[in-house]
Image (cartoon, coloured by chain):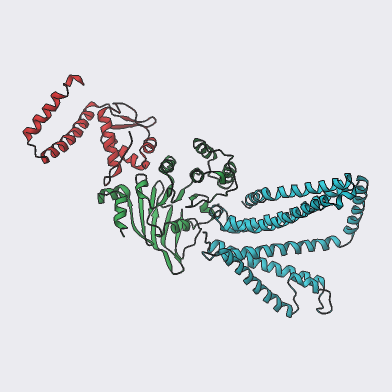
Amino acid sequence: MLTKLIGYEMKAFGRIILPLYAATIGMALIMGLGVRVLDREVYSNILGAVIVMVFTTLILATMVMTGVLCVQRFYSNLLGKEGYLMFSLPVETHQLILSKVLSSLIWTLLGGVAGICTVAAWGLTAIPVQKFVTFFREAGIFIRRMSLGQEIGEAAVWLLIGILLFAASLMQIYAAMAIGHQWSSHRILGSILAYFGIDIVKSIIARLLGQIGLYTGWTSFFIANTEETGVTMGQVQVFVIISTIIWIVIYSVATWYFLDRRLNLE
Amino acid sequence: MKWTFENGIPIYMQILRRLRTEIASGAYPPGAKLPPVRELALEAGVNPNTMQRAFAELERDGLVYTQRTSGRFVTKDTEVLKNLRKTLSDDVIEEMCGRLIRLGMSRQEIRSAVEAWASANGTEADE
Amino acid sequence: MAVLECIHLTKKYGSLTALDSIDLSLEPGRIVGLVGPNGSGKTTLIKLAQHLLTPTEGEILIEGQEPGARTKSIVSYLPDREFLPAWMNVESLLYFYEDFYEDFDIARAEQMLESLNIDPHMTFRKLSKGTREKVQLVMTMSRNAGIYLLDEPIAGVDPAARDYILRTIIGNYSENALVLISTHLIADVETVLDEVVFLKQGHIELHENTDALRERTGMSVDNYFREVYRC
């Protein structure tokens, strides 16, 4: 059932996001060809400026849209009119929540992949094939050297931290919306207030923990390896991973409670 | 014909009355197959259970019999059909006479009015 | 055996009591009318049966179980508002239902849509309001469910659509299923009902066989309803 739910989310996201991906990659191809075919001078005029602007707008639009959809799919599909359909499916409440979190995560990662594809599309068209082959050969050497060392492990840790921080911030929004829907009117305002309420609690706890030398927020990466605090980056990573997992659990339980036990559809 | 129902009388009794009339009048001739419960319920816009109850009542009175595989049929027993016609016509006569008496007519006046109606509307042979 | 059972079921919204310790037992093979004016607790009762609300006290049981994922697989629910995703087309809605509900009879749904001349490639949003309501009814009635919960299915529809809805309900009648129809328009549905449950301010005022009620009171259920709820 969870995979069916995620499959349905893929469609709901995809119908909006995929055209944006296609447009961005297409624009990258056009830009690349432009560099190859046209004179360099052409790019220093208005046409060049317009193309670059459109391209930048498309990238921004894709990023913003991904973020908006991550929130909006939860809001309209579970808490809006469609909630009557979704909460009538023979699935457990936690599966509904999990499907939203996982599909948001998948689409955010796919956004990264699309970004790489965009760069590749531009590169393939803009740079002569010869140079491209050399680039890949060098990149290959670089990656091989990395795998010899601990960089891959390090990168994996950072990726894990990124995913956890993303999931936690998304689930904070979900929890806030679930709480905001306890009111029968002004639900958006309620959700926003709930969000900041959680934020305040979170920062108070983070500050208290900081006083005993436990740095938990993502900002603590900046103070690692400094004399002032005397904690290493490795320690901060561990603190952040554990504390983020704890927050994810808290948000999950809160969201589940309000959706399963205190559901209040319009 | 469209089905309409009156207030205050159980629906199954109204269906029963109508089906009896249709059997007596020959709209469903002796030995004819009756439509399935569901189909007739749909036509009348009533609950299938209500239609079923009316059918059960018809069966109890011997007007209808069930063949396990092929459905429900109107009885071929002429005696039963004759009795049905008698019961139904008695009801009509009872009601009509009651109303005429309430209009202030005497029995003699009613009798001559009925005879006048019969002669004005042809003879038995015309039917 | 009862398929839907309420035992001292109570639901409060803050200080407002929507349902006050009601006891109710409904059996399969019946079409039951849940009637009462607005605010009498009809929608609350249906939402409790579907776990869209949780009881304040007491319990509601579907085939002996508390409402949840298991019971939702045997309950087909038609909410009193539009609930299908507007961006999907009718065909993908059919696949969605087939995907999630094992008891969904897609062939029956397709046939019903065809008889209504509804183009399955149309986006739900682009259909007229009346057609959207019909699609929702088709989806709900095309499941071979044990319980159908229909919340105000005939409110605000034209007479032709109302007839279509009632015929669909009769046409899909199954002796293994309970159909619970909530409505405040009794005159339109009373010939279709086996039983009627009158709700009044969160209490059950009456639960009786409709024909028995007509015989006992010498009135139509609608006229009796007007008497009970006279202001």
Quadrant showing the N terminus of chain B: top left
- Left or right: A145 in relation to A17: right
Residue lying at 75% horizontally and 74% vertically, measured from the top left: A215
Residue C116: where, in percent of width, then height?
49, 37
Vertical side of C81 occupied by A263: above or below:
below
Q: Residue at x 16, y 36 (%)?
A: B96
- When the figure is inspected, residue A226 is found, relative to residue A35, above or below; the finding is below
Image coords of residue C2 (percent x, y): 41, 52
Q: Position of residue B114 (x, y in %)?
A: 12, 29
> Hey, which quadrant is residue A201 in on the image?
bottom right
Nearer to the camera, A45 or A6: A45
Q: How many marks?
A: 0
- Farthest-out residue, front: A46
Q: Quadrant of the C terminus of chain B?
A: top left
Shown colour of chain C: green
Chain A's colour is cyan
Residue C193 in view of the camera: no
Q: Nearer the viewer, residue C210 or A149?
A: C210
Q: Is residue A231 visible?
A: yes
**From the viewer's perspective, is A45 left or right of A266?**
right
The x and y percentages for residue B50 are: 34, 42
Q: For chain B, give the colour.
A: red
